[in-house]
Image (cartoon, grey):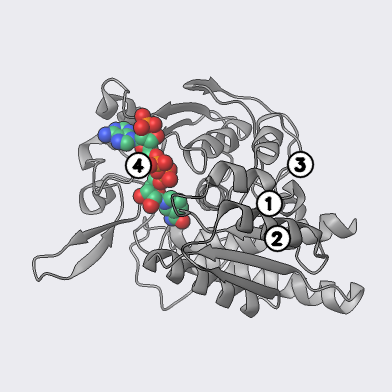
Amino acid sequence: MRVAAATASEGSTDTITGDSSPAMTPADNAGIKKTRMNDPRSVLPPNVIDGKAFAAKLREQIGKKVATLESEHGITPGLAVVLVGENPASQVYVRNKAKQTREAGMNSFEHKLDPETSEKELLELVSKLNLDPAVNGILVQLPLPDQIGADQVLTAIDPAKDVDGFHVINAGRLATGQDALVACTPLGCLMLLKDRLGDLTGLNAVIVGRSNIVGKPMAQLLLKENCTVTIAHSRTKDLPGVCRGADILVAAVGRPKMIKGDWIKQGATVIDVGINRIQRDDGKTRLVGDVDFEAASARAGAITPVPGGVGPMTIACLLLNTLTACCRQHGIEVPE
Ligand SMILES: NC(=O)c1ccc[n+]([C@@H]2O[C@H](COP(=O)([O-])OP(=O)(O)OC[C@H]3O[C@@H](n4cnc5c(N)ncnc54)[C@H](OP(=O)(O)O)[C@@H]3O)[C@@H](O)[C@H]2O)c1
């Protein structure tokens, strides 16, 4: 497995076709090296993409760059994570993000706010973080309580510190081929795809799901890689038929095992973004993706598991974005 550079892209309609504008993503700018990883302990079948191992290697590379930044420039990147309320899943995400931020040698600033926090109070905190030179990246954990408008809050974050890549400025930059902070999950998916497939030029890519945080930026990234991109959604006609045409199939739906094995083209590369908790026969719960993994893996040339596929890449790319944002704010190159 290699940790490969990823590039950004442009364009977003229901069916969009190749472009080669020169956008750069954090992975390009950070100069993440193509490092082959051979883990003799790995027991995964050869067509299963080990996102966990890939993300660990990526975090290690980021940690080395952070150490160089500190020794050469005396700068330590800082990530502020804001959690409003007590959503159990969000608490776990925020804890993991803080832990991995510290492990990469960056400063982690955690702000845990009362569930009753008003929009005004949250916006005041975001303003303070925007002005704080020790904070290079700001992440407000979603979902937010009902009294707070997510759009207002995301728009208030300084685009230069928007390490989630959700601000319209960053979405627009991605769409027009300019330097952008790119949403972490699609960026991680692209890195896995390029690692497995190398040049993606001319491949048919189908993305099921058109959310602003996964489906649309994923389409932009694949378009930049010269794929022929189709975005499918809940109104798509003959979804199985559309999926069967995909050399690359990205599922970002949020419906357990919706994508069936016989929807997969023989040899296709399948990236399963979905995270769904389902009840097991013994009453406990387990996580499954949007793809019926057992059936799909019999046909796929490569496929990400859930868990252990895309999930770990999201936090690794958050750290990468924080490093990139920090270097850009100081006007310096990301260390080699
Ligand atoms: N691994 C990670 O780090 C990570 C990060 C983010 C999200 N996720 C997971 O990824 C999944 C998607 O997240 P999201 O935020 O993109 O979800 P979302 O905002 O709810 O969007 C879901 C998309 O799926 C489409 N869809 C729903 N039912 C469909 C159907 N029957 N056929 C075809 N398309 C259908 C929707 O179409 P319409 O637009 O027509 O409604 C929508 O575009 C979730 O399971 C989420 O937990 C994982």
Q: Nearer the viewer's eye, disc 4 or disc 1?
A: 1
Q: Give the Cα separation between the discs numbered 4 and 1.
A: 24 Å
Residue under label 1, please give it: 162
The amino acid beneath tag 4 is Val
Q: Nearer the viewer's eye, disc 4 or disc 2?
A: 2
Q: Is the residue under label 1 in contact with that under label 2 (CB below 8 Å)?
A: yes
Q: Give the Cα separation between the discs numbered 4 and 3.
A: 28 Å
Residue under label 4, please give it: 253
Q: Give the Cα separation between the discs numbered 4 and 2.
A: 28 Å
Picture residue at 51% right of the left edge, 38% below the top: 212
Q: Give the Cα separation between the discs numbered 3 and 1.
A: 13 Å
In primary-sequence order, the first of circles 4 and 1 is 1
Asked whether mark 4 lies closer than 8 Å to ligand 1, one says yes
**231 lies above or below 261:** above
Residue under label 3, please give it: 179
Picture residue at 79% right of the left edge, 74% below the top: 76
For the residue labelled by badge 2, is the local secondary structure a helix, a strand or a loop?
Answer: strand
In primary-sequence order, the first of circles 2 and 1 is 2
Q: Which percent across, then down, holds residue 316?
A: 58, 64
Q: Is the residue under label 1 in contact with that under label 4 (CB below 8 Å)?
A: no
**Left or right side of 156 for 131:** right
